[in-house]
Image (cartoon, rainbow, N blue to C red):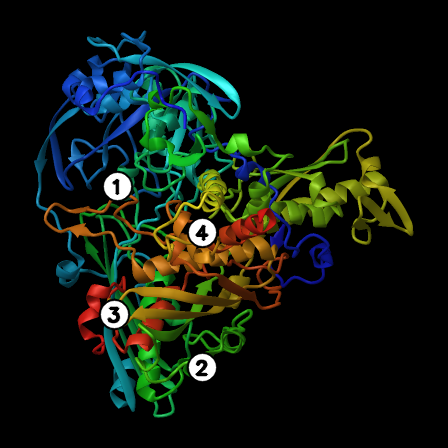
Amino acid sequence: MAPSNDWKFTRRDVLKMGAMSVTALAAPRLVAGGSESGLGATSKPVTAKVGMEVNGAQQALELDTRTTLLDALREHMHLTGTKKGCDHGQCGACTVIVDGRRINSCLTLAVMHEGAKVTTIEGLGRPGSLHPMQAAFVKHDGYQCGYCTPGQICSAVAVLDEIKADIPSHVTGDLTAKASFSRTEVRERMSGNICRCGAYSNIHDAIEEVAGGAA
Amino acid sequence: MKFDTPATTNPIDRLKVVGKPVDRIDGPLKTTGTAPYAYERHDVAPDHAYGYVVGSSIAKGRIVAIDTSKARRAPGVLAVVTAQNAGKLGKGNFNTARLLGGPDIEHYHQAVAVVVAETFEQARSAAQLVHVDYARAKGTFDLASAKGSATKPKDGKPDTAVGDFDKAFAASAVTLDATYTTPDQSHAMMEPHATIAAWEGDRLTLWTANQMVDWSRGDVAKTLGIPKENVRLVSPYIGGGFGGKLFVRADAIMAALGARAAGRPVAVALQRPLMMNNTTHRPATIQRIRIGTSKEGKIDAIAHESWSGDLPGGGPETAVSQTRLLYAGPNRMTAMRLAVLDLPEGNAMRAPGEAPGMMALEIAIDEIAEKVGMDPVEFRVLNDTQVDPENPKRPFSQRRFVECMRTGAKKFGWERRAARPGSVREGRWLKGLGVASAFRNNLVMKSAARVRLERSGRLVVETDMTDIGTGSYTIIGQTAAEMLGLPLDRVDVRLGDSSFPVSAGSGGQWGGNSSTAGVYAACVKLREAIAQKLGVDANTAVFDGGDVVANDRRVPLTKAVAGGDIVAEDGMEYGDLDERYQQSTFGAHFVEVRVDAATGEIRIDRMLAVCAAGRILNPKSARSQVIGAMTMGVGAALMEELVVDKRLGFFVNHDLALYEVPVHADIPHQEVVFLDETDPISSPMKAKGVGELGICGVAAAVANAVYNATGVRVRDYPVTLDKFLDKLPPV
């Protein structure tokens, strides 16, 4: 995984500097103040420049440092395929793949991802050229309202990679054996992605088909 | 077009497109994240600002003072709207509580302010600076203690009675008298209530997540005090509703008010932690059920009483409704009583009435069957009725309930169920099977559409119908394709815009059948116009393969539109067939569970639903509706409960971490069987609803399976291990 910046600090250094500057460390190109003013504004938001590669394209942004990766994608890059279901890391609708690992993009600030490679649902496939997982979701009707779907698909793609990379889960019985695909494994690993429409049974069929094809 | 006599043969019966399990036509958009939901319309409102809602931190009382000065001075803030500066607001026909509180507060997290800023981060930050002084008033929050004060609701039919229940019950050979409770539940759809509002002069456009476009257009107008014609609602994709988006909610009104104050478009999504208390929920119930039977298990007497609560002016949870229709029995009564509670507004959630009603009734049936010494499948079969038991002259339009039970029992291996509960042990697991009936009425609603055959040969369908995950896009496309003899890929379906003809909308499982019937009506008119253009008889012409076949000649449809598009608009209205016949949908749910003998952990291993719900317009999307409903039923059975803080009057677990819903690990592979049937009394589509049938009875089937596994009966939902762990047999 690429480091988020070039600066090296010890944990003690970070603690000494205090909580306020931690964000600044993660985002070295700090810009004082923004252009916005309130009805009688007294202070201005802290912004920072951040660059990342999203779906293969370089993005250079200047963001309020409070902006989550999710809101950077949706509100600043207009990549609205990634959904905001709870904004608290409880539902999984905002799942994206950052440097090969799936994360909840609502639980991480955009400025923490300098130099990262981000793949969103738009980066997996487009209508007319669907990723195999997207096509399997269509075939097995692995969705209904469609709102959790991009997160489910990003998670599903990453889950198969995790199993391939021999990363164990909570239900892996034998940590010394190679991780393998099973219903129990997939259900456990997918359980951070809530589908209130209840398409789980179909989602599983879609993932199983792609896993079978990939094996 | 009026539907007042049962359907005969019509073009839908060709079943070249309708009835086929085709993939959803919106699938490629939804799976690539390119279907636009309400809060993500940078395409139409590129310069919108952001609103953040402040919710009341008291349940009842009034705002003494509200200080927005700090918030207004915060960076990026464009406006702060409260009841003080919002202007005069009305209340929608479908709302019980007002959507902007102040000075009076009616429930916890009722919106009291919206802070509008340039960015989301600024709005969120500034919202913390709104300071509200409240005077808290004493409220009533506990249904059990308010039960004694409950009164007969004014509307509907709170009391029904046929025969002499008391006498028959007293004389019955076998009796059951048991009380069940169901908790408050939350829709918890994945997409928060969200709206982008934009004003152009005195005209308002709302891109919003709403199931009922026309109802809500009217209620937005009424709330804001502007003419309905000045409001446009656009709701093409909705990230789940389940009844929670039937009505206008605070997101829409706060966005509209915020946009007016800020002088530019404003986007508002209700923050997830506000949703459970700010919006509506399925109200808790206390239900008493009494059943008296003969020694042989014939029901002589059946009574179902239900208590629920709501805000002043609200209504009851109609949990007794299925008991009026589901089982035979000459002596019967139902009653509903409503307490005034100061909790957030109670309202419809997927299968209102029947969902919680069947949670109780179907445990009661399991209990009485055991008392009689009968298999619960056989007990239900024995007490089937083919007529409305309150009015035996009124038949069901179709009722293949017994076939559902028999088919399911056979397919599920019901004969392997041990009649003696708690008697099957496999290693650490106690195993059990459960069954319950599924029942939900079929409602038909007026619905219209506009269809246009374009010169290119493409067919465009426009209706304000919504697709909340139900598959409306696809079945509407299939209907239009069938009617015009076109392949599905030559049809474009446009939904969810109030500038389109008014549809049935999505609710009460009426949407699929009613909206396609409206499209059918419009297509009949379009066929007539095309036939006229081609000089053939519309009644005998066959629309097939992109051609019109008449008088042994085959003419391409495109010939009719060589001179320009042909447009037709019509709708379907209904006569009294739903009064002359009882229209309902039926099913049977079968569940297998295992319960850890030591810890009480419950796992569901198998689920099967058998449904009889008229013609299934698309078996793939209909099956998804049913498995989704079964999943929500598992939630109702095992985990879903809004926990009431009885001192302060709010739902404590108001987010998705604490309000638990089923996840992947909770749900096994699910089987669904649809009986092959048509119901010509329902509509020319001969279809009925299915999306709510799927949830009715599921929770009881799970609870009955847990009883069969453990021998411990739990009558208070959800069935959590704390309610039975101490009664489990010794390990």
Chain assignment, label 1: B
Amino acid type indicated by mark 2: Arg
Which of labels 2 and 1 is toward the front?
A: 2
Q: CA distance from mark 3 to mark 4?
A: 45 Å
Q: CA distance from mark 2 to mark 4?
A: 38 Å
User: In this view, which residue lies farthest toward the right?
Assistant: B552
Label 4 crowding class (10 Å Cα cut-off): few <14, some 14-19, many 20+? some
Closer to us: A162 or B312:
A162
Chain assignment, label 4: A
Disc marking residue B108: none
Chain assignment, label 2: B
In the drawing, does residue B559 fall left or right of residue B670?
Answer: right
Judge whether B541 appears above or below B556 on screen.
Answer: below
Amino acid type indicated by mark 3: Arg
Which of labels 3 and 1 is toward the front?
A: 3
Q: CA distance from mark 2 to mark 1?
A: 51 Å
Amino acid type indicated by mark 1: Ala
Residue B170: image location, x then y, percent? 24, 87
The number of numbered badges drawn on the structure is 4
For the residues bearing labels 2 and 1, Cβ distance under 8 angstroms: no
Q: Which residue is mark 4?
A: A178
User: In this view, which residue lies farthest toward the front?
Assistant: A176
Which of labels 4 and 1 is toward the front?
A: 4
Judge whether B509 appears above or below B403 on screen.
Answer: above
Marks 2 and 3, the one that precedes in the sequence: 2
Q: Which residue is mark 3?
A: B715
Amino acid type indicated by mark 4: Lys
In the drawing, does residue B67 fall left or right of residue B248?
Answer: left
Which of labels 2 and 4 is toward the front?
A: 4
Judge whether B52 appears above or below A175 on screen.
Answer: above
Disc marking residue B416: 2
